[in-house]
Image (cartoon, rainbow, N blue to C red):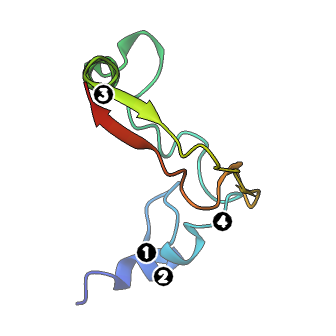
Amino acid sequence: MPCLLPGLSPGSLPDGAVPLQDQGREDKVHKYAWVPFSSGPHKCIGLYYGGMQIKAAMHQMLLLYRWSIPADYQMAINWTSLPRPKDDLPVLLERL
């Protein structure tokens, strides 16, 4: 039996399970179906560890490099979902 077959037939799933064809639909998915670091007082320590790693890396980048953009740069904004530069913001890094 193919491994995807049980997920395609709704009658073969346990109560509360979402068939594969309905997994992309927001009205069929449980609101806590994807919580990467859990929630509440028992959050995964990886959430805080990952944040500390990013802060440590940025600290070193700010200490060791001069950040600049070209003097004549005019930022064009892409408004499709979240505002961001259309040309990915050409940042120049110069080691101090």
- Residue type (three-letter) at the residue carrying disc 1: Ser
Foreground tag (1 vs 4): 4
Residues under labels 2 and 1: Cα distance? Answer: 6 Å
Residue drawn at (25%, 22%), measured in percent from left and top? 64
Residues under labels 2 and 3: Cα distance? Answer: 57 Å
Mark 2 = which residue? 9
Residue drawn at (74%, 61%), measured in percent from left and top? 80
Within 10 Å of disc 3 (Cα), the crowding (few <14, some 14-19, many 20+) is few
Q: Nearer the viewer, residue 81 or 23?
A: 81
Q: Earlier in the sequence, mark 1 or mark 3?
A: 1
Q: Secondary structure at mark 1?
A: helix
Mark 4 = which residue? 25
Q: Earlier in the sequence, mark 2 or mark 3?
A: 2
Residue drawn at (52%, 42%), measured in percent from left and top? 69
Name the quadrant containing residue 58.
top left
Q: Earlier in the sequence, mark 2 or mark 4?
A: 2
- Residue type (three-letter) at the residue carrying disc 3: Tyr
Foreground tag (2 vs 3): 3
Within 10 Å of disc 4 (Cα), the crowding (few <14, some 14-19, many 20+) is few
Contact check, label 2 and label 1, Cβ < 8 Å: yes
Residues under labels 1 and 4: Cα distance? Answer: 20 Å
Q: Secondary structure at mark 4?
A: loop
Q: Residue furthest top?
A: 41
In the figure, is residue 5 to the left or right of 46? Answer: right
Mark 1 = which residue? 12
Mark 3 = which residue? 65
In the figure, is residue 16 to the left or right of 6? Answer: right
The quadrant in which the C terminus is found is top left
Within 10 Å of disc 2 (Cα), the crowding (few <14, some 14-19, many 20+) is few
